[in-house]
Amino acid sequence: MNTLTRWNPLRELEEFQNRILGAFKPASADRGNGKESLTAAEWMPLVDIAEDDKEYVITAELPEVKKDDVRVTVENGVLIISGERKFEKEEKNKKYHRVERSYGSFARTFALPDDGDAAKVNAEFKDGLLKVRVAKSEAARPKQIEVKVS
């Protein structure tokens, strides 16, 4: 059975290394006038992937994302969830002291397993959760055959 995600241990190792090395940077490199510098982080929604005998279900957390800003596509055996979380408009009387939440475009890709039916993919979006269901093909489902004893 194929998996839905491709794990890249080198990418995780690189991210871990950057976090560790960032902790040892001189204070002058990150701060100016005693203030922390802000860097924009790449935003990628978290997902859960579950499976039963009929389908795969991918649940993605998309807080503060509007339904119209989310796209689900299947192309060449790859499921793509993409969209954008927009930053609220700055108000003239409001001054931000810290912005830690990430905004912007995102894309998550998942290779469909061999038994996933690309023609039977549906998605529903409710309360900040996107549920994408990928049906398993009929041919790949286990069938019980009655054995007759003679």
Image (cartoon, helix red, strand yellow):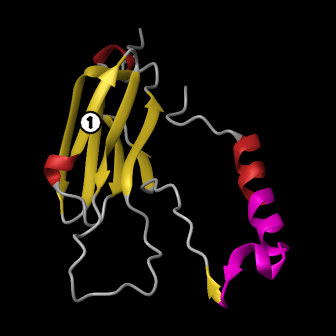
- Estimate the x, y position of residue 99 in percent, counting from the top left: 44, 77
Question: As shown in the figure, which amino acid type bears the numbered disc 1?
Answer: Val
Q: Which residue is mark 1?
A: 72
**Range drawn in magenta:** 17-34
| Residue 143 visible, this orientation | no
- Estimate the x, y position of residue 61 in percent, counting from the top left: 35, 60
96 or 130: which is nearer to us? 96
78 or 53: which is nearer to us? 78
Q: Quadrant of residue 81?
A: top left
Magenta highlight on residue 28: yes
Q: Is residue 31 left or right of residue 135?
A: right
Residue at the (28%, 29%) spot, across then down:
73
- Estimate the x, y position of residue 112 in percent, counting from the top left: 43, 26
Quadrant location of the C terminus in the rendered image: top left
Residue at the (22%, 25%) spot, across then down:
120
- Determine whether 142 is above or below 91 in the image: above
Magenta highlight on residue 70: no
- Determine whether 115 is above or below 79 in the image: above
